[in-house]
Amino acid sequence: MTNENKTFIREIKEGQPIDSIFLVINKELRPRKTDGQYLRLILADKTGEIYCNMWDNFQKTFATFQIDDYVRIRGHAKMYQQKLQLSLTDLQKVDSSEVNIKDFQKTSKRSADEMWKELNEFASSIENRHLKQLIKNIFQDEEVKNLFSAAPAAKALHHSFNGGLLEHTLSVANLCNFVAEHYKTVKVNRDLLLSGALLHDFGKIFELSYDRNYNYTDEGRLIGHITIEAIRLQKEIDKIPDFPKELALQLMHMILAHHGSYEFGSPKRPKTIEAMILYYLDDMDAKIEAMFKFITENAAEGRWAGYEQKQFDRFIYKGSLFEGQDPGAEE
């Protein structure tokens, strides 16, 4: 199949016949309402995911492919409970050599070189020599740099695309830089806050796998990115002679508290001004990007995006984003 024949999920309409290649996100056999089973799949490309059902002739096919394989499917699109899905008549595994990888890689709109330049500028602006050395040591490591350039910030909820972790980190760093300048009378420790912003999610390069489908590594599932960060951060701090104990303690607290509350996996709740700022700005950046993603992925469903997004648990009004207009612009 040539690239010109690729049908993207975001372009699929009700009743449309489909003959295209997709990535397998999930597969399972489910019981039918009557006797027997059917094959349920979640397929994906860079534009989204879609549920698929194969009702007949799937028994031999089921064992020929796995999650993270590419498959060529034939079928048609139909609506079920107001959601578009595919009904399949044929499915065959295809070799990755037949696939245009760019059709399946969601990537940041910003270039990695541009973002690394910005990160290095933030690192250079840190005046505290211990924090500056710490940031330099971590991000000049070739493995960390390569992984950080490619990693998503999350499996699905926000900045879930290649380079998303770097983009999210810089967004939080910019917000922290602004807030540190704004609260001059509070005497926010700008170097500490910015260091926490740059390091708060770097453990996700080991928590997530992202060669094809985004998923959790064994390390990610067993201990998570916050614990990974704490372990690696302490090792890096120990390499720097005379790193102040109080400074290390406050930075470590920011890492351990940046999810804000126990119910969201935070080992500690924020107990310093810098930790509180980092928590709120990290949470805000993630939620804004997630809301925008939800709106754009539901562009064909009217002026309101549906209630099924568990992260928000509410209807989301699309307004001018749906219309493509500025509500304040003159006609």
Image (cartoon, rainbow, N blue to C red):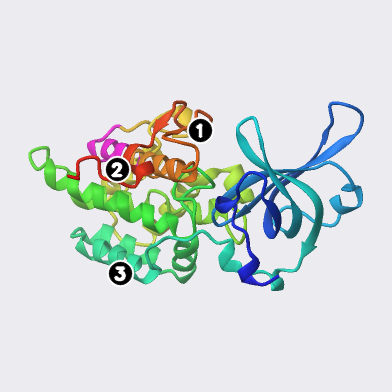
Q: Is residue 208 left or right of residue 15?
A: left
Q: Residue at x 37, y 56 (%)?
A: 167
Measured in 3D between alpha carbons, the distance from the residue under mark 1 to the one under mark 3, in whole angstroms, is 35 Å
Q: Amino acid at mark 1?
A: Gln
> In the displayed structure, would residue 212 be above or below residue 291?
below
> To which residue does mark 2 refer?
250
On the image, the x and y values in percent for residue 103 come to 58, 64
> To which residue does mark 1 refer?
309
For the residues bearing labels 3 and 2, Cβ distance under 8 angstroms: no
Measured in 3D between alpha carbons, the distance from the residue under mark 3 to the one under mark 2, in whole angstroms, is 27 Å
Front of the two marks 3 and 2: 3
Q: Which mark is residue 117?
A: 3
Q: Within the magenta stretch, is there residue 278?
A: yes
Quick one: 158 or 12, which is closer to the camera?
Answer: 12
> In the displayed structure, would residue 4 be above or below residue 76?
below
* Residue interval drawn in magenta: 271-282
- Looking at the rendered structure, the secondary structure element under dot 1 is loop
Q: Earlier in the sequence, mark 3 or mark 2?
A: 3
Q: Within the magenta stretch, is there residue 255?
A: no
- In the image, farthest residue toward the left: 185
Q: Earlier in the sequence, mark 1 or mark 3?
A: 3
On the image, the x and y values in percent for residue 268 come to 40, 32
Q: Residues within 10 Å of mark 3 (few under 14, many from 20)?
A: few
Measured in 3D between alpha carbons, the distance from the residue under mark 1 to the one under mark 2, in whole angstroms, is 35 Å
